[in-house]
Image: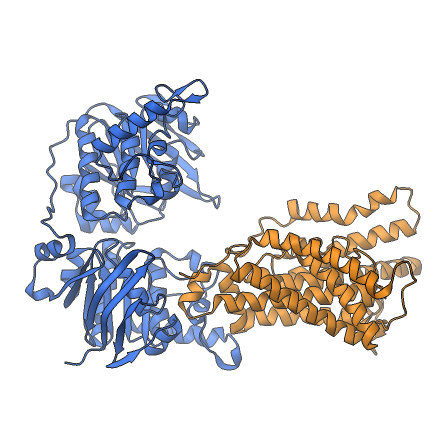
Chain colours: A orange, B blue
Amino acid sequence: MTDFLKELTNFLAADVRTAVPLLLAATGLIFSERSGIVNIGAEGMMLIGALAGVAGSYFLGHAWMGVLVAALVGVLLGLLFGFLVVTARASQIVIGAAFNLLGLGLTTSLARVIFGVNTSPPPIDAFKPVAVPGLSRIPVLGEVIFHQTQLTYLALVLVPVTYFILFKTTLGLKVRAVGEYPRAADTVGINVYRIRYGASMVCGMFCGLAGAYLSLSLLNFFTENMTAGKGFIALATVIFGKWNPFGVLGAALVFGAGEALQYRLQAAGANVPYQLLLMIPYLLTIAALAGFVGRAVPPASSGRPYVKE
Amino acid sequence: MAYLLEMQDIVKDFGTLRANDHINLKVEEGEIHALLGENGAGKSTLMNILYGLYHPTSGTILFRGKPVRLNSPHDAINLGIGMVHQHFMLVPALTVVENIILGMPRRWGLVDLKTAAQEIREVARSYGYDIDPFAKVWQLSVGEQQRVEIIKALYRGARLLILDEPTAVLTPQEVRELFRVIRRLAEEKYTVIFISHKLNEVMELCTRVTVLRGGKLVGTVNTCDTTKEELARMMVGREVFFQLDKEPPSLGDVVLEMDKVEALNEKGLKALKGVSLEVRAGEILGIAGVDGNGQSELAQVITGMRKLSAGRIRIKGRDVTGTGARYIYEQRVAHIPEDRQAEGLVMDMSIKENLILRQYYRPPFAKGLFLKWPAIKENAVQLMKEYDIRAPHEEFLAKTLSGGNQQKVVLAREVSTQPDLIVAMHPTRGLDVGATEYVHRRLLAERDRGAAVLLISTELDEILNLSDRIAVIYEGEIMGVVPRDRADREELGLMMAGSKRLKAS
């Protein structure tokens, strides 16, 4: 029985660890999609954030500085994305795809320039689990939730914060209105473009944080294409979570569980080719989107540029 | 006399099109001022300038005697100008209270929905409106949404209220209710600009009228010094005949027979509930009703564009239930769809191509897999002459035509094949008086030729002018069918609102 509990605790803790990058990116995507911008470039932004995090920590000597750099780079990426899709009105899908390609190419090259080729990763300051006094003693849950890194706590705290901003503040109301019916927002004096720029930058920041989590908290170095599709799963997380921060938390845990399960089974030496196990999170994504969500209704103007008359 | 609002020499160009050409408008405080003109006369443009949505090419606006610059609706709202747009500016997915406080500064930047809801209830109640602040806007009827728009403007402190074609979507009873509120507002020194092209309403409600035509100012008159006929002349620029000459119908066999037809809409809800109708050759059956009560679905099931979930449809005695659009068309059924730009025409195709969209696959327009361009061109030249389609030649794209000429293209394509049944939905929506008259005469001519016509319209006047019998649809049900000579506007209005039902007649 204790073995089972231990196994369960380990599994759930792994679930939380794999869920956090999805959660962070998806939280950012909620802002963006609620304002009417579909950002399929999240994958590329996360990847750039991951490298920026490592580089920041490497050059500035502190993990939190890495996080700061990753967030700032993310904001800049969001600004660029906003300029291209809001002001230049380029196709959101094409620009998103371009960001993904840019992210992969840029980080691969820059990583080699900064850290050299084929050398062992340099030692950098990264996050280590910090037990929350008292709470971490709760059986199972204490270990699962209250014995994580600071970035994990940050991600979890941002869930109710995001909910509060979206549903309890005038700013959140504006964001939601702009994503549903921008012309109506325009006629009551809301600057649609400014809201969309802001949402895009917030989304970039969250993607940067998600990347930094991968390279400074889950691991402590950068590897090529280390996001491995997490940005796309984050997009699915938003849909599965029905554009709601708490829904997205649940969805991230479901998808995270898929990935954690795959690790567990591999580690346990299950007699199945590991390639099949690697498919679990993606199969889960497809199944979730196809079946369980029911009809998820996206914001009505999602993906459509707004042209002021 | 000092005016509340003076718009002086307003010019607005859209590219090469001059939508407003040196227009002057003076409005006194506390008056109900009508802005009258046909579609495309420049009324909405002028009001969008006043509301800060458009910037005038030249001209000045004085508000309470001072020149003002209106860069965005924000500036207009701050001056106390509110506007209820023809297409409501409400977010369907949000609640009433969220829509009303949207974009307003609130304490601490928080949406205090409970306080706001209380305040909104009070404003609403003082005008005799009862609205649930926590209802989602998409759940409200069109009339209720309009009330929300009016309260939204008042709650933001509007003293000058612009109402853009507010009666277009209402039943006669709702119109009366709206007029009551407008008069209440005027008594309390609110100022109302009432945009309309309906002369009766303008004469009934307003004190003064400013008439626009083709982007130019025709003049401003007091309603007490003028007549409906004079206003019509100012608006159209020539004499207008209000009554169409109509022969009594010579009825033939039953052409369309619907038996307890049911159908679902996109949301999977029942849009038609047990609709049974008959239309005979040589008559026009008008379907009256407020927009969104199943009219679109009705036209679609008859023309084969939507599946029935129950019931049967027979055309000339032949059961066509479950067949497709082409099969039904080949039973000589014509369709004038509700949105000519989205469903009636391919806007990026030429006139001649649009004219063969029905028959492109058969002779003389096609031979095997190949199109016969000489025949297609000849067809276009002939129909353009016959239907008075005004365009330099048949190669012009549909999107370059005026609304009236676009509708003539649709009409020519559908009607020139001498159909036995014509399903016409909103056939004159957005057309000027001349084009409207033309469409009406054509439909009557088709009826006299012996076609059965099903006319679906939300304009009660159109229904009353053209129909031989009138059916009223409400929430997907036929509330009753009355012969034209026994139809009473008041009674039809009650049926349109769902509060009265006739026994099967």
Percent across and percent down for residue B66 are 26, 82
Relative placement, left or right, of B187 versus B147 is left
Query: In which quadrant of the rendered image does the N terminus of chain B lie?
Result: bottom left
Please tell me in which quadrant of the rendered image residue A129 appears.
bottom right
Count of residue discs: 0
Residue at point 88%, 42% (across, down): A273
Q: Looking at the image, which is closer to me, A260 or B175?
A: A260
Percent across and percent down for residue A181 are 46, 60
Query: In which quadrant of the rendered image does the C terminus of chain B lie?
Result: top left
Please tell me in which quadrant of the rendered image residue B180 appears.
bottom left
The furthest residue to the left: B225
Q: Looking at the image, which is closer to me, B50 or B364?
A: B364
- Residue B323 is at least partly visible in this image: yes
Residue at point 60%, 72% (across, down): A164
Q: Looking at the image, which is closer to me, B479 or B211?
A: B211
Relative placement, left or right, of A50 versus B122 is right
User: In this picture, is B306 found above or below A4?
Assistant: above
- Residue B177 is at least partly visible in this image: no
Q: Looking at the image, which is closer to me, B33 or B303?
A: B33
User: In this picture, is A25 found above or below B169?
Assistant: below
Residue at point 20%, 75% (across, down): B30
Percent across and percent down for residue B128 are 29, 69
Relative placement, left or right, of A92 versus B365 is right
Percent across and percent down for residue A270 are 91, 45
Please tell me in which quadrant of the rendered image residue A81 appears.
bottom right
